[in-house]
């Protein structure tokens, strides 16, 4: 082991931060680029399912809230692309890889949002799962990623609360509104559990990412944390989670719960989910239609040189 490698290992062992100019193994750099890019792409694609409701929100207040939330997601994408760029990759290349399907984004955004209650459910369950997954990433070993996550998590917890508040309001409404919430929760529960990735035994990256301090917990640990956090919230809302195996286990001090359909996760991640084609097609169109903005920014940059 040479000196720079030793320094890297020491920094990881001390749970300290690796910074962009520090030496790092190629695999560490590659893993970070993969994970941060996937995360950034998820934020960008994640604008679509909820964005579809901006023009149909039921009041001016709800429209303002939704617009602000979707703009926040765009901002998260930008912080994360910037963090990825500190690893020597180019944002345009990452965007191309998203649009060509070469890089992944979170499976959850390949599900449709046919009901307005889905806006609340995404805030409550999807942002809730995102928070569980991302709070520990504030302590990830790569400095720029961890610092981006601090800001993102603050905004995500606000998003989660707005989703819960929306659902609470609907649950206090008519029978029809309560049924809309339950139907939406039934559709999103299992896909939300899949956001944490495959079970640990089938996760090729977890062990290495944990050893490098990129991930601080395994997929199954975070999934368990999410279930434990969400069950009392579901009780407070008065909705049922669609899992007959869900029950408190006194001995373990955790909830037992059923397994999602892991074949479905594989299908959705490999491009065969309900909305994969639509999401990528929309992103490509938005990219093409945004060409004039990039051209104007380039021209302004050249003029100021
Ligand atoms: N969806 O070995 P594994 C959000 C892939 S957005 C798609 O366990 P890893 C939000 C995985 O990439 C939420 N792909 O991998 C935004 C790997 O593929 P490759 C996004 C998945 O990386 C707007 C393979 O399967 N959050 O917060 O150790 C509105 C094997 O998996 C998924 C993040 O990205 C999936 N669900 O662990 C609201 C957080 N699961 O690349 C909310 C950061 C697995 O080897 N990312 N794959 O071909 C992570 O924490 C980790 O990357 C994961 C996966 C837990 C997702």
Image: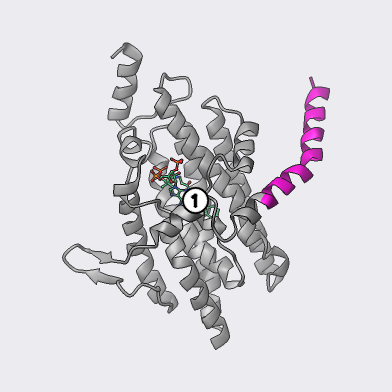
Query: Residue at label 1?
Result: 269
Q: Is the magenta stretch mostly helix, strand or loop?
A: helix
Q: In which quarter of the image is residue 244?
A: bottom left
Q: In this view, does 288 lie to the left or right of 6?
A: right
Q: In which quarter of the image is residue 66?
A: bottom right
Residue at the left extreme, as displayed: 251
Q: Is residue 174 visible?
A: no
Question: What secondary structure is marked by label 1?
Answer: helix
Q: Which residue is drawn at 49% across and 64% down?
A: 124
Which quadrant, please, contains the C terminus?
top right
Q: What's drawn in magenta, residue-wise? A: 281-305
Image location (x, y in percent) of residue 42: 55, 48
Q: Does the residue labelled 1 lie within 8 Å of ligand 1?
A: yes
Image location (x, y in percent) of residue 18: 40, 27
Front one among 220 and 141: 220
Which quadrant, please, contains the N terminus?
top left
Q: Quadrant of residue 119?
A: bottom right
What's the image's color scheme?
one colour
């Amino acid at each position: 082991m040479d000196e720079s490698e030793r320094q890297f290992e020491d920094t990881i062992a001390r749970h300290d931060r690796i910074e962009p100019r520090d030496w790092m193994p190629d695999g560490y750099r590659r893993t970070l680029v993969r994970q941060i890019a996937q995360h950034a792409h998820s934020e960008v694609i994640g604008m679509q399912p909820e964005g579809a409701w901006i023009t149909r929100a039921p009041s001016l207040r709800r429209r303002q809230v939704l617009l602000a939330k979707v703009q926040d997601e765009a901002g998260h994408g930008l912080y994360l692309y910037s963090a990825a760029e500190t690893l020597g990759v180019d944002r345009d290349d990452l965007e191309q890889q998203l649009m060509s399907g070469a890089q992944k984004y979170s499976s959850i955004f390949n599900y449709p949002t046919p009901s307005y209650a889905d806006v609340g459910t995404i805030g409550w369950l999807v942002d809730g799962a995102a928070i569980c997954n991302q709070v520990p990433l504030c302590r990830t070993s790569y400095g720029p990623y961890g610092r981006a996550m601090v800001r993102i998590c603050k905004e995500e917890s606000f998003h989660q609360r707005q989703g819960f508040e929306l659902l609470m309001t609907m649950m206090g409404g008519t029978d029809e509104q309560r049924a809309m919430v339950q139907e939406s929760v039934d559709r999103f529960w299992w896909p939300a559990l899949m956001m944490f990735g495959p079970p640990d035994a089938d996760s090729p990256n977890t062990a290495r990412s944990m050893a490098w301090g990129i991930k601080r917990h395994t997929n199954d640990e975070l999934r368990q944390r999410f279930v434990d956090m969400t069950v009392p919230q579901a009780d407070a809302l008065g909705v049922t989670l669609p899992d007959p195996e869900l029950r408190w286990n006194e001995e373990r001090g955790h909830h037992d719960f059923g397994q999602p359909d892991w074949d479905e996760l594989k299908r959705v991640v490999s491009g065969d989910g309900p909305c994969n084609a639509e999401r990528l097609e929309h992103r490509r169109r938005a990219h093409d239609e945004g060409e004039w903005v990039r051209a104007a920014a380039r021209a302004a940059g050249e003029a100021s040189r």
